[in-house]
Amino acid sequence: MIHIFDVDHTVIDKSGAWHFLREALGDGVIRFSQIRRLPFDWIKYKIRSPDMDFIETTVKKLAGIKKSELMRISDLAFERRVKGDIFIGAEKLIREIQKKSEKIIFATSSLDIIINPLERFFGIEGSLASQLEFSDEITTGSLVGLSLFGDKKKTAVKAWIEKNGLDPKKDISFYSDSYTDIPLLEYCGKPVAVNPDFTLTKEANKRGWEIIRFKEVLGKKFTQ
């Protein structure tokens, strides 16, 4: 069995991009004017009317940043913010799967440079993420291909499954919190709703999908 995990609100409590941007803004690598649309995109997502191309639109504003600077910020954000935000239950589940020598990858709309430290933490390689394009180690303001959001994530995962000669119904378990991943959850043989939002909870209950809820994180405890 191959286990494919979404990241935000599934493996970590908050958004990896949120942690990264807080660090980048504080360090002056990114200015608020470059990302001022994101709060509105978040609201549209929460009311289930997302702009499916918001990642492509956002990265246009990030042209001209050195790759080395983004990598530095990503490492800082992981150590200061992301590591403590990992769900204890998610870490335990991933470690248990690894003990069985079953493969795990992430499939996330987050930028590859943001999730790389999380991959290293778990010893995971080959994850699928929205990939920033660089020219001479400088961001171009574009992605390599498309972002992995909504149906575009399903397209990327489907291509990966086919490339590896796998059967999605027999070989793939997919874990996600979001209603935007319902098409991918129904495509895979073992869908698991992790900390599902209202829409996904309703869908998972209707379809009889497994539901897991994590509460505690490595760096703190919280109550719902």
Image: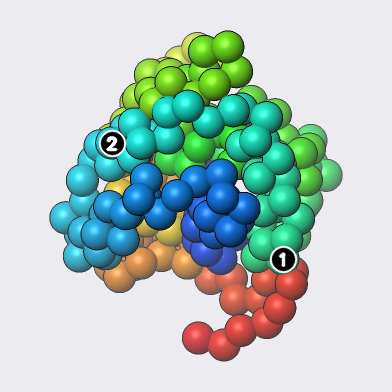
Where does the image place residue 65, in percent across and percent down from the top left? 53, 31
Q: Secondary structure at mark 1?
A: helix
Q: Quadrant of the N terminus?
A: top right
Vertical placement of 87 versus 72: above or below?
below
Q: Amino acid at mark 2?
A: Thr
Toward the viewer: 27 or 135?
27
* Total residue callouts: 2
Q: Which mark is residue 103?
A: none
Q: Amino acid at mark 1?
A: Gly
Vertical placement of 173 versus 208: above or below?
above
Instruction: Please say whether residue 16 is visible from this viewpoint.
Output: no
Estimate how packed mark 2 is, as few (under 14), some (14 to 19) or many (20 or more) residues with alpha carbons within 10 Å.
some
Q: Residue at x 61, y 27 (%)?
A: 67
Q: Residue at x 42, y 35 (%)?
A: 62
Query: In this rendering, would 108 be left or right of 113?
Result: left
Query: In this rendering, would 123 be left or right of 202?
Result: right
Q: Residue at x 53, y 71 (%)?
A: 213
Query: In this rendering, would 196 be left or right of 38?
Result: right
Quarter of the view holding residue 159 = top left
Where does the image place residue 166, in percent across and percent down from the top left? 52, 20
Q: Residue at x 43, y 40 (%)?
A: 109
Q: Secondary structure at mark 2?
A: helix
Q: For the residues marked 1 and 2, what is the alpha-carbon distance in whole angstroms?
A: 30 Å
Instruction: Please say whether residue 99 is visible from this viewpoint.
Output: yes
Where does the image place residue 157, in percent across and percent down from the top left? 44, 28
Return the residue at label 2.
57
Where does the image place residue 4, in percent across and percent down from the top left? 55, 39
Does label 1 or label 2 sit earlier along the sequence?
Answer: 2
Quarter of the view holding residue 124 = top right
Return the residue at label 1.
84
